[in-house]
Amino acid sequence: MNEMTTPQEKLTIKDFTSDQEVRWCPGCGDYAILKCMQRTLPELGATRENTVFVSGIGCSSRFPYYMDTYGFHTIHGRAPAIATGVKLAKPELDVWVITGDGDGLSIGGNHLVHAIRRDVDLNILLFNNQIYGLTKGQYSPTSVVGTKTPSTPQGSVDPTLNPIAFALGSGARFVARTVDTAQKHMPDVFKRAHAFKGASFVEILQNCIVYNDAIWEEITNKKTAPDHQLLLEHGTPMIFGAERNKGIIFNTKSFALEVVTIGENSVTEGDILVHDETSLQMARMLGDLGEKPGEPAPMGVIYASEADHSYVDAVRGQMDSEKGKRTLKDIIRGGQTWVVE
């Protein structure tokens, strides 16, 4: 990393770009995410010496090498645990966790659950390409049923794991989604995640051009995207579609969200649900939206709810209360100990 930032210095994208050669496959969605992050950090007022990127194992986990900040390339699935230690040791740092659908939701699922439920002040970015890219294209927890890969030659039979539902079920208080091609949308999501005090979870739909190309084609293609993306904005009706004539209502019979066409069956704009990002019940329903044909994928901040407590502050408070009271030897040999004769 270069020299420390001075208070008068205004950083740019170049200041957050390391001298390392970026080694992803040409056309990989990771390039777009990287550039977006390098461009967004100066807008956040971030400094290189107070920014840390922690990754696990996978294509996405090369990320720390390409950022001119501090960083850890750790072990498979353990990035949330390492990041928790970093944040507890130095609470003033901005800590970003970079993981993938395989790294974070398979071997790392346990660590991710606990980082989220503890509400550690981390910015967790999960790149979801529905495949294991680094190890040559095996199916992942988020792969759709029937995905044929070297590890599932006849098609996967596992139910697909939903990252948004996973995060909400783990107790996340900030959950959002964006996509690698959304260079205007993604920075706004990063800024909201960074500003949130607690564990922020962002799913980034990302294309693997080699092993799972075009898996998000309907969402990213300019012609089809309006009909397959539901851009969320707090306090705004959930209307979408190329002609802005589709919307989301709550069906009182099925107790689920339903796609309707404005102007048909007496449906008016007044019938369309207004997005409330503070509603956990709405967030859970939005988390399931997009899994059925004809349903759009919610994009943006799905859930954001402030808390009156801080895990980091609580742990640091306990640490401070013990200062000077006991030595390390006292701690190790204190409490329940016994001698085996």
Image (tube, rainbow, N blue to C red):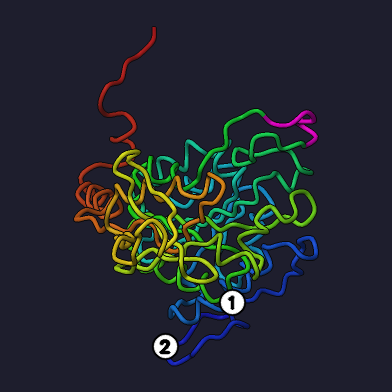
* 224 falls in the magenta region: no
Q: On the rendered image, what quadrant is the C terminus found in?
A: top left
Q: Residue lying furthest front in this view? A: 265
**Is 336 displayed left or right of 55 in the figure?**
left
Q: Main secondary structure of the magenta part?
A: loop
Residue 257 is situated, as x and y percent measured from the top left of the image, at 38, 48
The residue under label 2 is: 7
Give the extent of the magenta segment: 149-156
Q: Is mark 2 on a helix, strand or loop?
A: loop
Identify which amino acid the numbered label 2 is placed on.
Pro
Residue 210 is situated, as x and y percent measured from the top left of the image, at 80, 53
Residue 270 falls in image quadrant? bottom left
**Is 323 displayed left or right of 37 in the figure?**
left
Residue at image point 20% right, 45% down = 325
Q: Which of 283 and 90 is in front in this view?
A: 283
**What is the C-alpha distance between the residues marked 1 and 2?**
16 Å
Q: Is mark 1 on a helix, strand or loop?
A: helix
Could you tell which of marks 1 and 2 lies nearer the N-terminus? 2
The residue under label 1 is: 16
Which one is in front in this view, the residue at disc 1 or the one at disc 2?
1
Residue at image point 60% right, 78% down = 2
Identify which amino acid the numbered label 1 is placed on.
Phe
